[in-house]
Image: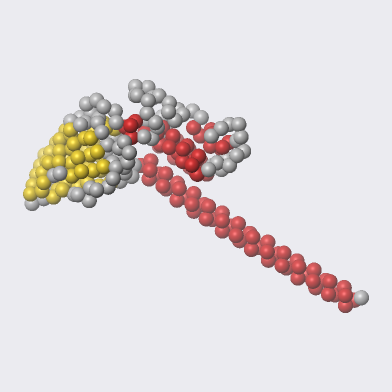
């Protein structure tokens, strides 16, 4: 993308590159959700380079170094595998519940326990301490839910005793460089669920894409109707011209 020819038409790939920069900026806290939504909507509505360029003018270019992190391509899984010890090593619920969600770092091994209670581990916005992390779930007359983002490989090795572990997300190939999440432990009169959900930014991107598709369809219908109207008007003018010519010949 360049400022030298702002009148050039932008491609879908150009718009997607800008959207990727915006998603990275949202994840890094450079944009809040309202700013992200406004800019993402402008991205999918942009038709030229001149309309796309200002959207990311105040954001780091792809390949830029973020403070406190090693260089990583924006949007890549490498940017989310940060090393270290993780935000916490475990969570417990007895006659209650726990939740881990939003921006947090999953350690190499995370242990959670629920007795007559439940918990949720949401990894969609999380960073990872290593390429492979283990989540050990012990559920006794309780339940837990592990939510992973698209692209992550999931392996379930838990054992259920009058209970069960959800294996539906196993066998889905991970994206290149994505972390591997291994779910272990056991469930006694309880259950551990594993599900794959898109991130909030991805849901918003899809919503805006669907909205843009509806706008494009409406514009196409308007263009088609306008074309029909012009054809009818031209046919009507030809018919009137024919009548006038016929009368002129009759008068002669």
Say which quarter of the image contains residue 229.
Answer: bottom right
Is the residue 214 above or below the residue 49 in the image? Answer: below
Which of the pair 78/187 is nearer the observer? Answer: 78
Residue at position x 46%, y 41% from top? 16
Q: Nearer the viewer, residue 3 or 221?
A: 3
Q: Nearer the viewer, residue 46 or 184?
A: 184
At horizontal 39% and vertical 31% (from top left) the residue drawn is 73
Q: Residue furthest right?
A: 252
Where is residue 204? Give x, y as percent.
40, 44
Residue 181 coordinates in the image, percent (x, y) = 23, 39
Which residue, as the protein is rendered here, is positioned at the far top? 68
- Whole-percent x and y of residue 219? 56, 54
Question: Is residue 121 depicted above or below 62 in this figure?
Answer: below
Q: How many marks?
A: 0
Q: Is residue 174 above or below residue 220?
A: above
Front one among 168 and 234: 168
Q: Is residue 209 visible?
A: yes
Q: Residue at x 40, y 36 (%)?
A: 23
Q: How is the image coloured?
A: secondary structure
Query: The C terminus appears in which quarter of the rendering?
Result: bottom right
Q: Is residue 227 left or right of residue 185?
A: right
Quadrant of the rendered image containing residue 115: top left
Residue 98 appears in the rendering: no
Residue at 52 percent of width and 52 percent of height: 215
Q: Whole-percent x and y of residue 32? A: 40, 34
Q: Residue furthest bottom?
A: 250
């Amino acid at each position: 993308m360049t400022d030298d020819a702002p009148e050039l038409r932008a491609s879908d790939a150009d718009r997607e590159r800008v959207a990727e920069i915006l998603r990275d900026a949202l994840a890094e806290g450079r944009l809040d959700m309202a700013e992200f939504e406004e800019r993402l909507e402008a991205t999918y509505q942009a038709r030229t380079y001149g309309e796309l360029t200002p959207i990311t003018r105040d954001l780091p270019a792809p390949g830029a170094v973020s403070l406190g992190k090693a260089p990583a391509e924006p949007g890549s899984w490498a940017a989310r595998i940060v090393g270290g010890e993780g935000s916490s090593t475990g969570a417990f619920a007895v006659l209650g519940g726990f939740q881990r969600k939003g921006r947090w770092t999953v350690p190499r091994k995370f242990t959670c326990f629920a007795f007559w209670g439940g918990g949720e581990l949401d990894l969609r916005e999380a960073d990872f301490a290593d390429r492979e992390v283990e989540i050990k779930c012990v559920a006794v007359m309780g339940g837990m839910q592990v939510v992973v983002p698209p692209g992550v490989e999931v392996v379930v090795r838990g054992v259920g005793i009058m209970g069960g572990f959800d294996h539906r997300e196993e066998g889905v190939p991970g994206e290149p460089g994505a972390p591997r999440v291994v779910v272990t432990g056991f469930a006694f009169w309880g259950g551990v669920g594993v599900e794959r959900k898109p991130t909030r930014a991805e849901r918003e991107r899809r919503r805006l894409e669907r909205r843009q598709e509806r706008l494009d369809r409406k514009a196409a219908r308007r263009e088609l109707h306008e074309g029909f109207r012009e054809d009818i008007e031209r046919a009507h003018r030809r018919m009137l011209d024919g009548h006038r010519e016929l009368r002129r010949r009759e008068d002669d």
